[in-house]
Amino acid sequence: MSARARFRAPFGWLTIEASDQGVFGLSFGGRGVAVPAVSALARGHLEAARAALADYFAGRPPQRPALDLRGSPFQLRVWRALLDIPFGERRTYGELAGTLGVPGAARAVGAANGKNPVAVLVPCHRVVAAGGRLGGYSGGLDTKRWLLAHEAAHGPVLRPG
């Protein structure tokens, strides 16, 4: 069973989707109709995601909700590596490929990054092209700029102590 809820971010609506295992989707816009959680587990994951987003946007350290990431083994490796990029910092696709032990796979990392189903909570916005160019972003480049500026302003506070 899955559930869907909306969250009002400073730049627009986000749609959160959760299962009994955790949050598996966070997308830009108010996509689809809200679907109430049938189980207490899914309801808890939606509320944990809302709380994490509220803290993040308020400049407070968020407690990451349980995630139910669904993808290929390589995508999962990339998405887990995104979770290790500290608030307020950026990595290039090439640097991330090197971290994963696959130097020269910047394009494959970029493709996996672009398929991230849990934007913001899994911080794909922290990855930029070589030379610092922003590249693409599912929420649009204005949203990516906003997120990066927000983290630059609050990065030291957002990092876990």
Image (cartoon, helix red, strand yellow):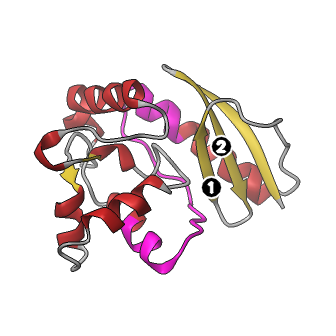
Q: Is residue 155 left or right of residue 2?
A: left
- Compared across the picture, whether 34 is left or right of 136 comes to right
Q: Position of residue 28 (x, y in %)?
A: 58, 35
Instruction: Give the x, y percent position of residue 106.
Output: 25, 64
Compare residues 109 and 118 and report the one nearer the observer. Answer: 109
Looking at the image, do the residues carrying marks 1 and 2 touch, with CB atoms under 8 Å apart? Answer: yes
Q: Quadrant of the N terminus?
A: bottom right
The boundaries of the magenta stretch are: 52-78
- Which residue corresponds to the image point at 28% horizontal and 32% vertical from the top-left? 148
Q: CA distance from mark 1 to mark 2?
A: 7 Å
Residue 39 picture location, percent across and down: 84, 57
Residue 84 numbered tag: none
Q: Residue furthest left?
A: 131
Snapshot quadrant of residue 24: bottom right
Residue 66 lies in the magenta stretch: yes
Q: Amino acid at mark 1?
A: Val
The circle drawn on residue 16 is 2
Residue at left offset 41%, top offset 60%: 111
- Tell me the residue that label 1 is attached to: 23
Instruction: Specify the quadrant of the image occupied by residue 62.
Output: top left
Q: Residue at x 75, y 55 (%)?
A: 42
